[in-house]
């Protein structure tokens, strides 16, 4: 082979080596990213399971407890709104 062919072979070998190294680095980074995403997905599943457990506990409380809490919140909300109105009772009596 003459000199020009050796130069072309050297350039192609160097280019192949560079792309091989870049491909290996990309593969390693993508594997690390996939592992992080798997851990994130698993923590999301664990959070959803905990939320289902909390919802099941609230279902077990019964309607009377929930309605009592709702009644308390509504009455506190209504008291807060009636204080902010100007002439609240006077308007109702007219």
Image: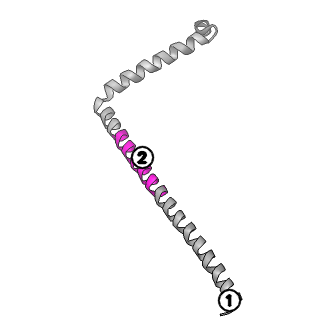
Q: Is residue 38 above or below residue 69?
A: below
Is 31 in front, or is 19? 19
Residue drawn at point x = 48 percent, y = 16 percent: 76
Q: Residue furthest left?
A: 60
Disc 1: which residue: 5
Q: Position of residue 75 (x, y in %)?
A: 46, 16
Q: Is residue 47 depicted above or below 15 in this figure?
A: above
Query: 85 or 32: which is nearer to us?
Result: 32
- For discs 2 and 1, the disc positioned in front in the rendered view: 1
What is the x, y in percent for residue 30? Answer: 50, 60
The residue lying at 58 percent from left, 74 percent from top is: 17
Q: Residue furthest front?
A: 3
Compared across the picture, whether 81 is left or right of 61 comes to right
Colour scheme in use: one colour
Quadrant in the picture for the N terminus: bottom right
Query: Percent from the top left, x then y, of residue 26?
Result: 54, 63
Q: Tell me if residue 75 comes above or below residue 90 in the rendering.
A: below
Which stretch is magenta?
33-52
Type of secondary structure dominating the magenta stretch:
helix
- Mark 2 lies on a secondary structure that is helix
The dot on residue 41 is: none
Residue with the most extreme bottom position: 1
Residue 59, by quadrant, is top left
Q: Residue furthest right?
A: 4
Q: Quadrant of residue 70?
A: top left
- Which quadrant, please, contains the C terminus? top right
Tag 2 residue: 44
């Amino acid at each position: 082979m003459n000199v020009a062919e050796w130069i072309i072979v050297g350039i192609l070998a160097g280019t192949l080596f560079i792309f091989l190294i870049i491909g290996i680095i990309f593969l390693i980074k993508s594997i690390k990213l996939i592992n992080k995403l798997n851990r994130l997905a698993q923590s999301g599943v664990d959070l959803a399971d905990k939320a289902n457990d909390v919802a099941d506990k609230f279902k077990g409380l019964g309607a009377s407890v929930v309605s009592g809490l709702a009644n308390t919140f509504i009455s506190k909300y209504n008291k807060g709104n009636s204080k902010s109105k100007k002439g609240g009772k006077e308007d109702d009596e007219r």
